[in-house]
Image (cartoon, grey):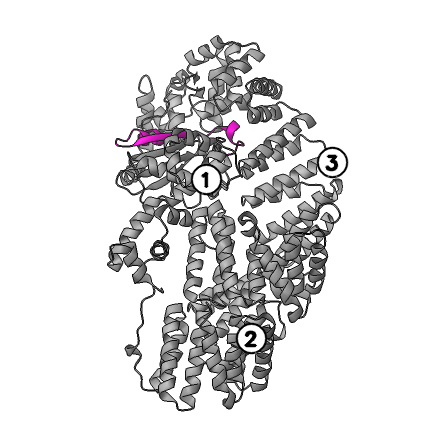
Amino acid sequence: METAAAPVGRDEELRRLTTLLSGARNGRGGSLLVLGEPGIGKTCLLTAATRAPGLVTVRLDGYESESTIPFAAVQRLVSLLREHCAGLPERQREAVLVASGQADGPAPDRFLVGLGVLGLLAAAGAGTPVLCAVDDAHLIDAESLDALAFVARRLAVENVAVVFAARDDPGFADRMGGVPRLALAGLDHEASVTLLNRSADRPLAPSAASAIARATGGNPLALIDLAGDALVHELPDLGLGGAPVPVGRHLEEHYVRQVRRADPRVQSWVLLAAADSTGNIDLVTAAAGHVGLGPEDGDRAEVAGLVAQQPVVRFRHPLVRSAVYNAAPGGELRRMHGALARAADGLGMVESEAWHAARAVLGTDPAVADRLAHTADLAARRGGLASRATILTRAAELTPPGPVRGARQAGAAEAALAVGAAHVAQRLVDGIDTTEVDAVTRGRVISVRSALAMFTADTDGVRRATAANLEAADAFHGHDAEREQVALLRAFESCCTAERLMMGVTREKLGRRLAVGAELAAGPTSDILRGLGALVLDPYPRAVGPARAALDAILALPDARMMHMGSAIAALGTFLWDDAGRADALARAAQAARDSGALQVLDTLLWVMAMSELWGGTLRRAVGYDELVREVRHAMGYDAENVPNVAVLAWSGAPRPTVEAIAEGTATTGFGGVESSAVASLAVRDLAEGSYQAAYERLVPLITDPFLHVTPDQYPDYVEAAARSGHLDEAARVAGLLAELADANGSAWCRGLAERSLALAGPDEDAERHHLAAVEILGRTGAEMDRARAHLVYGEWLRRVRRRRDAAEQLRLALRHLHHSGAELFVARTVAELAALGTAPEDLDSPEPRFGLTAQEHTIARLAARGRTNPEIAANLFISPSTVDYHLRKVFQKLGVTSRRQLADRLAGS
């Protein structure tokens, strides 16, 4: 039954919709979120969109009873587009089939499902342009909504448009971040009067029509329904009588009056149908039999204009359903839900049976709570963590007070946190009485609170997160060894986040607790904890072996576990000065996160990878990873990074006051690691500009108060600053420490920097052999910026001893590597040295690193040059293959190439 009014007074809204649909017909995919109060005309606009010529419509409606069934809407969408499933990449195909309940397999991440849905819609649109129309989107299950919102954000050059219509419920718009919005307001006065008179059986008096238009606020549904109410002609011209104006809540009262005019059996049938929002005819019919109703009662409800029964039970408007449901006595509602639960059980509808059984209960009911908990487990197996949180919350409400209720509340909080619903998780843990739970549940609550503090950047919580995770580990001790070890890994991660700002525990206590946790059981986690404990506690030479074993243990983990080890990989790789091993391990972890669609994990990994590149890599790659962080966060619906990578900003030449202000801001929220990396990066800027004393003063506090694996990375910069500012004894001392580290770890990167430092800090007669060793050894590593700086300081030394030709050669090499690595901040210093030799900088090659390509084009070009196919590139970047093809054509045009082989040659070494 079509109840939407003609879109009177919506010219501007229709123009915007027409532009969107025209774009889809011409290969410019897009999306729109239409928001507004009940009756404001959302469905009317959506229906107008579905009638547009030249598009095939795929329609999805939200149902309340499906709102806790994970991927319920995706399941319906996949069934409509099943013919295109075979063309999806294997991981995406598996994800959508498992999510839609059509295959067994590991629970998929909702963003990977979203990528699969994007592929399905793009494939469908390759024939005839597709409009995916989603009505009552606020009732769509959380997993499907996340997947569809992901699709809406990633549309680019597909023949696809996605239009959502939803009430602007609290928190809903936030979940749809990044999707363009159209907020519907009431019609203006002229359009309201026009719609009112068009809908009435006879014209209203002008004064009465104006009064109704004002009183309804221009709500189209209120106007239409009032126009059909015989009472409206009896209202005084201006006062509208004493009856409530039927808009919003009052419009529901209007519908209740209409329903109550019907026969009592019809009223009961309508209430039964209202209690099951899926509109499943078989379910409603079976349930009707349990309460003594028959098919004829449904037929009479249809004749009365309250519902339509084909192909599903659909009310003339959602407000009719909500009006009937909300006006019913609680006992009658429970009776209807009980009948629906029995009917669902008979039909084998496990989720629906549990959902209705829960609403048929008054107070607690352990049996129903157990069935809900089982349903929550089923949701988790399909990747439905948001649904699991909702279902477990209701299961906890039906569970008598005690340990089981607390455990279910904790499980709901963990699931909510896993999908980023921090406010929901916070409310859940706040409601747990920790005096009534067992030790394991208490530890889980502590872990969730700590993770929430990190997620929301609560200053005190971030600084105390290490202590909190150790407290959780103590609660798990003797009860759950696996959870205890996980809590200890999180304690180390949070220590790295807070660094010197950590409160409530010492690093020594952390190290001892890591060592104890390593002995709980044999296996890779124990090896990792043992290595991290050694990193914290042991003298460096003794810690190298356990640290190496820990990194090897991480590398041996399955991808699904390894991708969560970014902090440990970075810490161990940096501690061991293993630039290649660290980069390879992080790249593998990031690829695993991409393959599984775990964007939240990928977000963190890319941040860590950008930071790692600054010490032991290239600025170009660091900036690339930092840009990908923003791209990934955009795909998730966020505008910017959770925590800015201030160090990358500093290296990239951002204004010093900006860098300092952001660094101070991160420190005030407890992120000490971000602040210290920013300070160290500004010291590098000082070195590049020849402000050696300033660099020394910045680095002294970091060197004199060392932090684990981080401070040794700063030794080479400190040596250069100290040696060039007259603190030669201090420079020599730290250069010696660096050489001792190299002796212990066998790292070429560490040895090369030790040689560079010894050249700077030692006597002139020894300098050249150290310089030569530095450039030769660093040339075998991926630390290109360090290699460039080794050539630079060697060239400076050669100029000082008047070996001008050799100096120019080294400086040219430095400039080449600086340009190639993106470390432009050292170029001015290098060019100044060349100028002093009489060599003009314009004689040197200064290639544009990106050849005029955008960040996304450059990434796509590099992947294509490495032999990746379009579907593989699309999966890596969470876009569709057609978007990849579009960008590659632009890349070919900009670079003047016609094949991937030519592209690889053009980008060789870039």
Q: Nearer the viewer, residue 487 or 82?
A: 82
- Badge 1 or badge 3: first in the primary sequence: 1
Q: Position of residue 224 (x, y in %)?
A: 37, 23
The answer to whether residue 754 is visible is yes
- State how far apart marks 1 and 3 are (Cα): 37 Å
> From what the image shows, is residue 798 above or below residue 492?
below
What residue is disc 1 on?
113
- Check disc 1 and report its element: helix, strand or loop: helix
> From what the image shows, is residue 347 above or below residue 724?
above
Residue at position x 26%, y 31% in the image: 53
- Check disc 3 and report its element: helix, strand or loop: loop
- Badge 3 or badge 2: first in the primary sequence: 3
Q: Residues within 10 Å of mark 3 (few under 14, many from 20)?
A: some
What residue is disc 2 on?
715
Which dot, 3 or 2, sits closer to the camera? 2
Amino acid type at mark 2: Tyr
Q: Residues within 10 Å of mark 2 (few under 14, many from 20)?
A: many
Which numbered circle lies on residue 323? Answer: none
Residue at position x 39%, y 44% in the image: 153
Quadrant location, the C terminus: bottom left
Q: Position of residue 12 (x, y in %)?
A: 30, 38
- State how far apart marks 3 and 2 are (Cα): 55 Å
Amino acid type at mark 3: Gly
Q: Position of residue 335 (x, y in %)?
A: 60, 18
> From what the image shows, is residue 40 above or below residue 230?
below
Residues drawn in magenta: 45-71
Quadrant location, the N terminus: top left
The answer to whether residue 670 is visible is no
Which numbered circle lies on residue 402? Answer: 3
- Badge 2 or badge 1: first in the primary sequence: 1
Residue at position x 47%, y 8% in the image: 296
- Check disc 2 and report its element: helix, strand or loop: helix
